[in-house]
Image: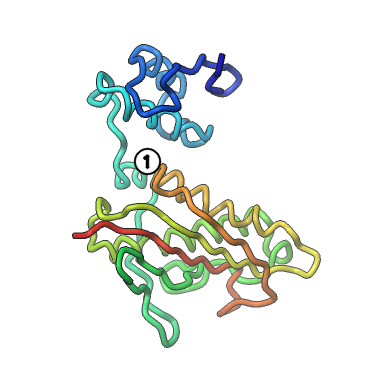
């Protein structure tokens, strides 16, 4: 029998769990109750399990509504800043067909770069992750503007690029980049899953610790 893993326990997977057919309401209700809310669900990596099943369970669609992006931001205590202005000769984003290309964003706050220097010295690995998270918040602010202030136009994040100013013997760029990836998943849910590149570099503009770029797909207005 297949099982869904939830924390330290396993729930038997319904037969239709990997198909498009509806699944049993009682089974899904128990699974969702186990995760006890969106925040814990995301932290345990279970949002795709919970809400993927709910979408195929008509009896639960009304009871377990997918949280909106605004609700996720509020729950995470995040207020998107005004879209950052370019610091050189470029524009914040370009739309080409159904794709939005977000220019590289720095971990800036109120017009100043909040994290400067390389990882792991003088910036620790944990602070590097915070820098990636902050840069991603700035990228989301631009993405929101690019969508005309309408999150419902966002299709998904296609690709994330994270550039990490690194000491020569530092090889955990992917761990730093998780600060950005985890935030996208927490805010956007399944739409935030993405392809990714994490690159170590010797220097970045304004001595920034990280720079983050996004490629997203949008729906027609």
Q: Is residue 11 left or right of residue 221?
A: right
Q: Is residue 52 above or below residue 4?
A: below
Q: 132 or 49: nearer the eye?
A: 49
Q: How many marks?
A: 1
Extreme-right residue of the structure: 169
Q: Is residue 101 above or below residue 59?
A: below
Q: Quadrant of the N terminus?
A: top right
> x, y (%) of residue 199?
64, 66
Q: Is residue 10 above or below residue 169?
A: above
Figure coloring: rainbow
> x, y (%) of residue 165?
66, 70
Extreme-left residue of the structure: 221
Q: Quadrant of the C terminus?
A: bottom left
Seen at 45% across and 29% down, the residue is 49
Q: Quadrant of residue 176?
A: bottom right
Within 10 Å of the Cα at label 1, are there few (<14), some (14-19), or many (20+) other Cα atoms? few
Q: 37 or 97: nearer the eye?
A: 97
Q: Quadrant of residue 163?
A: bottom right
Q: Is residue 196 above or below residue 49?
A: below
Seen at 38% across and 31% down, the residue is 51
> x, y (%) of residue 126?
64, 53
- Secondary structure type for disc 1: helix
Residue at image mark 1: 75
Seen at 31% across and 37% down, the residue is 67
> x, y (%) of residue 59?
25, 18
């Amino acid at each position: 029998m297949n099982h869904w893993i939830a924390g330290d326990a396993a729930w038997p997977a319904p037969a239709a769990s990997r198909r498009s057919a509806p699944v049993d309401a009682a089974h899904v209700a128990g699974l969702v109750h186990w995760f006890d809310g969106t925040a814990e669900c995301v932290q345990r990596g279970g949002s795709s399990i919970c809400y993927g099943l709910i979408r195929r369970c008509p009896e639960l669609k009304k009871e377990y509504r997918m949280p909106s992006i605004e609700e996720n931001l509020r729950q995470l205590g995040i207020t998107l800043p005004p879209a950052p202005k370019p610091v050189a000769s470029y524009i914040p984003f370009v739309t080409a067909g159904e794709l939005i290309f977000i220019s590289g964003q720095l971990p800036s706050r109120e017009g100043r770069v909040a994290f400067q220097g390389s990882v792991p010295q003088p910036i620790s690995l944990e602070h590097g992750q915070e820098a990636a998270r902050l840069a991603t918040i700035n990228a989301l602010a631009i993405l929101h503007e690019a969508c005309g202030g309408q999150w419902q136009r966002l299709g998904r994040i296609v690709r994330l690029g994270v550039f990490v100013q690194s000491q020569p013997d530092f090889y955990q760029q992917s761990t730093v980049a998780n600060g950005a990836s985890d935030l996208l998943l927490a805010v956007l849910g399944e739409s935030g899953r993405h392809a990714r590149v994490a690159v170590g570099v010797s220097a970045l503009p304004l001595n920034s610790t990280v720079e983050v770029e996004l490629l997203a797909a949008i729906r027609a207005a």
